[in-house]
Image (cartoon, helix red, strand yellow):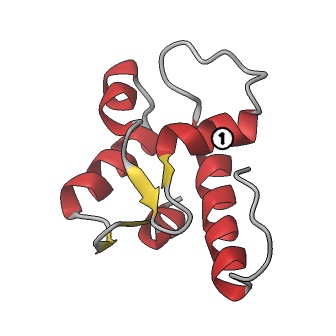
Amino acid sequence: MRHLIKQCVDLHGSMSQGNTALLTALCESPSEELWSRAQRMIICDVPLTTLRSAVNCVTQGRVQIRGAPDTFTLYRALRHTIEKRRRFRAHPELPFSEC
């Protein structure tokens, strides 16, 4: 999953070492404490996406997450966000949907 984390960007370009370490720790061993610290983290600059909104997008609100999302859900959220950014950058003129 580290290859996905390296592709995440915030508003300043690549994520800071602190945010990268926090996201890595959350993905390796999800916990409620790490989730509460990381959920508002920006993982994509265009379109602007937080970790929480990415998880909500891939679960489509059907999964009630108590505590932290599992590793597979985090993986899906990161992958979805990176692919969405790639599509948006390739075709910025096309209509864009949030999820």
Q: Is residue 50 above or below residue 67?
A: below
Which residue sits at x=66%, y=41%? 72
Q: Farthest bottom residue?
A: 90
The N terminus is located in which quarter? bottom right
Between 69 and 12, the residue placed more toward the observer is 12
Residue 5 location, x and y as percent?
46, 62
Q: Is residue 64 above or below residue 47?
A: above
Q: Could you say which quadrant of the image residue 95 lies in?
A: bottom right
* Residue for point 45% across, 57% down: 43
Q: Residues within 10 Å of mark 1 (few under 14, many from 20)?
A: few
| Residue tagged 1 | 72
- Identity of the residue drawn at 61% across and 67% down: 82
Which amino acid, mark 1?
Phe
Horizontally, is 66 left or right of 95 in the view? left
Please tell me whether residue 41 is drawn above or below residue 34 in the rendered image. below
Q: In the picture provided, is 63 more to the left or to the right than 15?
A: right
| Residue 53: % across, % down | 56, 40
Give the answer, above or below, for where 40 lies relative to 24.
Answer: above
Q: Residue at 76%, 57% (x, y): give it.
A: 97
